[in-house]
Amino acid sequence: MSEAAHHRPTGLSRWLFTTNHKDIGTMYLIFAFMMAIIGALMSLVIRAELFEPGLQLVDPNFFNQMTTVHALVMVFGFIMPAFVGLANWMIPMMIGAPDMALPRLNNWSFWLLPPAATLLIISLFVPGGGPAAGWTLYPPLSIQGGMGMDFTILTVHMLGISSILGSINIIATILNMRAPGMNLMKMPLFVWTWLITAFLLLASIPVFAGAVTMLLTDRHFGTQFFDAAGGGDPVLFQHIFWFFGHPEVYILVLPAFGVISQVIPTFARKPLFGYSSMVFATAAIAFLSFIVWAHHMYTVGMPMAGELFFMYATMLIAVPTGVKVFNWVATMWQGSMTFETPMLFAIATVFTFTMGGVTGLMLALTPVDFQYHDTYFVVAHFHYVIVGGSVLGLFTAVYYWLPKWTGHMYSEGIGKLHFWLTMIGINLTFFPQHFSGLAGMPRRIPDYALQFAEFNMWSTYGAFLAVFSQLIFFYLVWKTVKGGTKATDQVWEGAEGLEWTVPSPAPYHTFETPPKVS
Amino acid sequence: MSEQTNKKTATRLLLVAVAMFGFGYALVPLYDLLCDVTGINGKTQRADVSETKNQKIIFDRIVKVEFTTMVNTNLPWQFKALQKKISVHPGELTTVKFLARNISDEVITGQAVPSVAPSKAANHFKKIECFCFTQQVLQPGEEKEMAVQFVVDSKLAPEVDTITLAYTFFNSAKNIKPAKTDTGSTKNQSVAVVVNNSK
């Protein structure tokens, strides 16, 4: 065992056959970054077309493919793999385990991703083009689409298997591999949020896999699940989809909450305020996420009782989420704060995520949702939550742990430049969309009425700024990997936890003998 | 930690995943059941003549029943109700007529799908005979009169004074792809939407 564990292949086969959690984590992160570039370029196609009214650059069918594939790439190709990458890198180091519980499975979970992504990209080039039904894949559009839709369905299957295997691995690692003395309520919050996220994945992804399988059999094998002519019901798909879809948005954001809960105490130099309430709030959010799905479909014609139930249940989520936000603020309260780049990103995440949360409450109100439904207000809301919550959370994590991964300090000046340009970019992109949405601009349409022109122009400027600012991030990471000031083991003055007790860069194998946790 | 424990945990979790996949499928009958019981999907009730015969007719209450017809784009038929609306007493057996015509030069089988609004009336709108119970075959150019026999149950909530029965006729042939997915036709559709928006 120990001989095999110390064998470290080199070259291509190292990456193909690796079972090392750090290698796999790195591959996840690189893959996610590549997907982020592809998804961002698609968003630029969308924003360029919407720069001014009228049809300029792309034809409407291609525009619809862009909105669909942009969302699928960003959700399933970028954010989810990026957080799984972080989990791979950090969870074993944070709980004092030598590796993930099931290393071979881990390798397989990763290597399912590149073929899946390839399949999705290929779909854009087949006759009829890629999926154009929106990422929600609602029938009847998704039943009528060309073979690009079949490619997409198989992509979803592969990505789904990958995340299910990944989450099984994460749960097994956390439950079985903790160092002696590390009981559940001593685990770092990033580990806790990932444990809960993994259960969410396990319970929701298979339902989505079932839904797209039904789509597939409806399309080719004569079943009639969603075809009204054969006695099926398209609204049924919406129910099944959102039964998965709502937990999915918490899958995207809970690990970011975990990251924030690591970073803020470090730079406030105070322990996290209300640790156990954080754990229970996370669990409460996870539970509630399974009983609120129909708030995405108030307008399908539900009975009043249903709309009321989903409205109240949805608004209830604001309670545990509020607990988290207040805990973060209370952690900062009277702390000796410093504002290194990870801290800036962490505070920004709390701020922008809360803005998205507030518009979420507005959307939860059934009577007003009838006005907001399918407008740019919804687009603004979920981009504030997903970009402002998950993506900024990812940047937080990368800046926070980069010195531990590479052994070098990044350039604080370039990091801050990246931070400010990104913040200006994303707020310029998404803030005006609140107004165009409230004024009635519908989403997923390549043209719009003249009165929305200014808002859209700002949005487009912001999008280009936000995307091109990421070149700075790429340069910074590249430079830090190549060299720089040597990082200490603890890296940050206020950092606590097992991952800061190992050398920087973290050696290939850590905690082969479990540490003692007091 | 032993490999054994990890494998055991993994197997259990895999079972959870498989069970949730099954649960996704279980949602289909659950959804139908819920819609049937509550009538929230506008699904109408099918009844026997015997069931309705001994219902008392409530002569001092009048309910207006309106009929709407739609034809799915995949079906080259014309389809209309021969009477736009009718007033009935709860408990009274009523027959109304619809007319469908095949305007293509092919033999086509169609299937009508009914829906009742408001949804709280759906459980009390009982059909004894309906052309939607079976598929309808029309020869090229054939015109066909089709009947619906129904009873509005006397248990209908008192605040409901109008019921709308909507039929959509679908082409029951499998795998008809409407307007091929070449970009040309979709383009026109989108442009139409755009024009609509910018007025």
Image: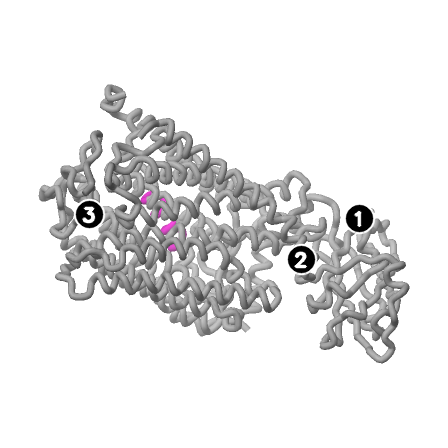
Q: Amino acid at mark 2?
A: Cys
Q: Is residue A292 visible?
A: yes
**Mark 2 → mark 3, Cα distance in angstroms:** 56 Å
Q: Amino acid at mark 3?
A: Leu
Q: Is residue A431 left or right of residue B92?
A: left
Circle 1 marks a residue in which chain? B
Circle 3 marks a residue in which chain? A
Q: Do dots 1 and 2 share one subunit?
A: yes
Identify residue for label 3. Answer: A476
Q: Is residue A425 left or right of residue B127?
A: left
Q: For the residue carrying disc 2, how many other residues have a C-alpha within 10 Å: few (<14), some (14-19), or many (20+)?
A: some
**Mark 3 → mark 1, Cα distance in angstroms:** 65 Å
Where is residue B99? Give x, y as percent: 85, 61
> Which is more toward the observer, A118 or A292?
A292
Q: Which element type, helix, strand or loop, lies under badge 3?
A: helix
Where is residue A350? Give x, y as percent: 29, 61
Q: Main secondary structure of the magenta part?
A: helix
Q: Tell me if residue A323 is in the magenta stretch.
A: no
Give the mark nearest the N terminus, 1 or 2.
Answer: 2
Q: Is residue B97 left or right of residue A260?
A: right
Viewport quadrant of the N terminus of chain B: top left
> Which is more toward the observer, A226 or B121?
B121
Q: For the residue carrying disc 1, how many other residues have a C-alpha within 10 Å: few (<14), some (14-19), or many (20+)?
A: some
Q: For the residue carrying disc 3, how many other residues have a C-alpha within 10 Å: few (<14), some (14-19), or many (20+)?
A: many
Q: Residue at x 37, y 61 (%)?
A: A320
Q: Quadrant of residue A173?
A: top left
Viewport quadrant of the C terminus of chain B: bottom right
**Mark 1 → mark 2, Cα distance in angstroms:** 27 Å
Identify residue for label 2. Answer: B35
Q: Residue at x 58, y 47 (%)?
A: A145
Identify residue for label 1. Answer: B109
Q: Amino acid at mark 1?
A: Thr
